Image (cartoon, rainbow, N blue to C red):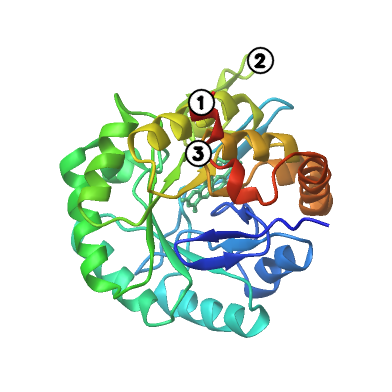
């Protein structure tokens, strides 16, 4: 029986599927449960230095093709975040990726330094949320200079913990941004955050569906955009591991986005469609495919589309 092990920046994952940031679970018990259900690792929701309220309800809207969210990165702040991370470490030995966010470059440095003290297996730096523009302006992921400045400071503050910079698809060239952050010291890229933002309205009430009016689009509808982003980044930076995220909704989708260049695969909105069964369903599909294939390990398939 072949296994689904992959190595990401020197960290061993029992399978490449990781819980995408923010989609499910803010407490240590709810996050560690995802590991028990079969995920290879977990990403925390975005952790802020200070408490951050997020947007008022309604913050989510879903169809069978996509979800739209404007949660607005609500978080209880660093004191609670540290507690959650410590409890999480006690509950699971599987890899924990701590996702951090801030409204300015200095705060990114400070939260990175504080979280690094807890020794997460990796740190994911969220510079790409599209639904907090009313508070913070365009995400840092929209500028090569800003994205590189955040990366440089985080890199300097976290010792040798691997850092993945989470990029936005809502830019002229995601490859240019990826190159800039790798030059500035990123070990890995997470691609992609949500698309848009998008907007929906109730035609009878003439009111927007989300209180924030606009929200980031996720789920199956964005999968082709994610595959293209991962493919392009891998073509430009073949030695940089990618946490390939966006619309993955089956084990076959996970295999496809790995073949485009992903090392790990972020799974988010799929959980709203498949519930607790998500992890076992997807890993079973992947195992069955691998077992019948000519490949011995999943690492052998990473980026093979580039040889096609
Ligand atoms: C409800 C919800 C909350 C999210 N919160 C965060 C967050 O706190 N930090 C972050 O980096 N990404 C956040 N995301 C983006 C996801 O991590 C992921 O990049 C995106 O949804 C695309 O993947 P998916 O289609 O598998 O959901 C959120 C997405 C959703 C749907």
Specify the label residue 261 is tagged with.
3
Work out whether residue 73 or residue 163 is closer to the camera in this orientation and state it. 163
**Mark 3 and mark 1 residues within 8 Å of each other at the beta carbon:** no
Q: Which residue is mark 1?
A: 225
**Residue 100 image position (x, y, % from top left):** 40, 61
Disc nearer the start of the sequence (2/3): 2
Where 302 falls versus 100 (above or below)?
above
**Residue 222 image position (x, y, % from top left):** 57, 27
Q: Which residue is mark 2?
A: 204
Q: Is residue 1 left or right of residue 196?
A: right
Residue 58 appears in the picture as rendered: no
What's the residue at 40%, 74% (across, down)? 78
Q: CA distance from mark 2 to mark 3?
A: 45 Å
Q: Tell me the mark number nearer the camera, choosing from 2 and 3.
A: 3
- Mark 3: few, some, or many residues within 10 Å (few <14, many ≥20)? many
Mark 2 element type:
loop
Where 26 falls versus 86 (above or below)?
above
**Mark 2 and mark 3 residues within 8 Å of each other at the beta carbon:** no
Q: CA distance from mark 1 to mark 2?
A: 32 Å
**Quarter the C terminus occupies:** top right
Disc nearer the start of the sequence (3/1): 1
Work out whether residue 148 or residue 199 is closer to the camera in this orientation and state it. 148
Residue 229 appears in the picture as rendered: yes
What's the residue at 83%, 57% (across, down)? 1
């Amino acid at each position: 029986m072949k296994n689904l092990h992959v190595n990401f920046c020197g960290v061993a994952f029992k399978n490449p599927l990781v819980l995408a940031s923010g989609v499910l679970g803010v407490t240590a018990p709810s996050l560690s449960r995802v590991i028990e259900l079969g995920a290879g690792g977990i990403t925390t929701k975005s952790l802020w230095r200070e408490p951050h309220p997020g947007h008022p309800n309604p913050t989510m809207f879903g169809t069978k093709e996509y979800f739209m969210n404007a949660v607005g990165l609500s978080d209880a702040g660093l004191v609670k975040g540290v507690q959650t991370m410590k409890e999480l470490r006690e509950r699971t030995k599987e890899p924990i990726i701590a996702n951090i966010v801030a409204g300015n470059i200095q705060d990114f440095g400070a939260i990175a330094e504080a979280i690094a003290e807890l020794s997460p297996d990796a740190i994911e730096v969220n510079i790409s949320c599209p639904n907090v523009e009313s508070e913070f302006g365009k995400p840092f992921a929209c500028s090569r200079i800003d994205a590189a400045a955040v990366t440089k400071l985080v890199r300097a503050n976290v010792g040798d913990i691997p850092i993945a910079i989470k990029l936005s698809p809502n830019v002229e060239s995601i490859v240019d941004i990826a190159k800039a952050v790798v030059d500035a010291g990123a070990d890995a890229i997470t691609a992609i955050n949500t698309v848009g933002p998008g907007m929906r309205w109730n035609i009878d009430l003439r009111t927007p569906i989300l209180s924030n009016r606009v929200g980031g689009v996720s789920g199956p509808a964005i999968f082709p955009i994610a595959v293209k982003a991962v493919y392009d980044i891998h073509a430009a930076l073949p030695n940089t591991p990618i946490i390939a995220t966006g619309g993955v909704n089956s084990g076959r989708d996970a295999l496809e986005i790995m073949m485009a260049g992903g090392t790990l695969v972020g799974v988010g909105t799929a959980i709203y469609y498949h519930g607790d069964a998500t992890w076992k369903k997807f890993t079973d599909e992947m195992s069955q495919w691998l077992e019948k294939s000519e490949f011995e390990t999943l690492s052998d398939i990473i980026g093979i589309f580039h040889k096609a």
